[in-house]
Amino acid sequence: MELVKNMSSPKKKSPARHGFKAQEYIVYPAHGVGQIVAIEEQEVAGIKLELFVIHFEKDKMHVKVPVAKALSIGMRKLSETDFVDRALKVLQGRARIKRTMWSRRAQEYDAKINSGDLISIAEVVRDLFRAENQPEQSYSERQLYEAALDRMAREIAVVNKISETEAVRAIEINLAKSPKRSAKSDADGDVDIDVDGEDSENVAA
């Protein structure tokens, strides 16, 4: 288990481990952007463990992650600015909507959001985005869209040193550059659709 809770008081602090250092912002797959507020050494059942203490401002919580497991569970440094630009470009593409059971698609979207990969998260934002002239999202679609939007905006804000509001605006500007979709074009299948064999729903002719 990667998270360590309710442990004894730290015995010492270390300046840096595995390229990560205190006060640095990182991305943790399950929670998004957080800040390493300390690197501690604690003793558990007679075994010494080094831990990253990560604060997630959005969730108002701290998580302790064993240093030895940080990379294997997907913890990573923030994206470089050119990678952020690539993710924003993804938003300008045509939505790829699989005509499969919603429950299956929802699982795929959730997996992408919690992968910690900025490009995958951008794909969720792109695919679930609805313009004013399109049908409204269902509650579950909206929840996933907002989760992906929040993860993406938070990382862009920290990388580009802007507010989250400005980051959301940058995302919306790029979404506005995507191919226009109307309610009719969606119904007519005028979207880049991947049809999955036996689980697929009927596509309008």
Image (cartoon, rainbow, N blue to C red):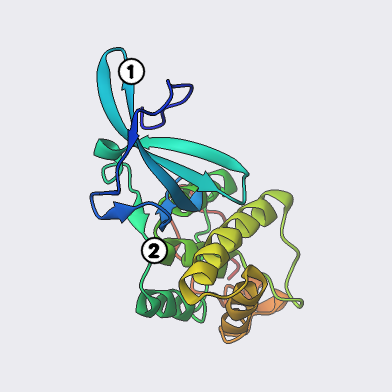
- Left or right relative to 100: residue 141: right
Dividing the image into 4 quarters, which one contains the N terminus?
A: top left
Residue 181 percent across, percent down from the top left: 64, 80
**Residue hosting label 1:** 44
Residue at the image point whose x is 44% and y is 74% from the top:
87
Relative placement, left or right, of 87 versus 205 is left
Instruction: Label 2: state its secondary structure.
Output: loop
Q: Determine whether 82 is above or below 46 in the image.
A: below
Of mark 2 and mark 1, the one earlier in the sequence is: 1
Q: Amino acid at mark 1?
A: Val
Residue 41 drawn above or below residue 97: above
Q: Quadrant of the C terminus?
A: bottom right
- Label 1's element? strand
Whole-percent x, y for residue 149 in the image: 59, 63
- Give residue 137's quadrant in the image: bottom right
Measured as percent of width and height from the top left, residue 174 is found at 56, 82
Please rate how many residues cluster around mark 2, counting C-alpha atoms within 10 Å: few if below 14, some from 14 to 19, many from 20: many
Camera sees residue 131 = yes
What residue is shown with label 2? 78
Q: Amino acid at mark 2?
A: Leu
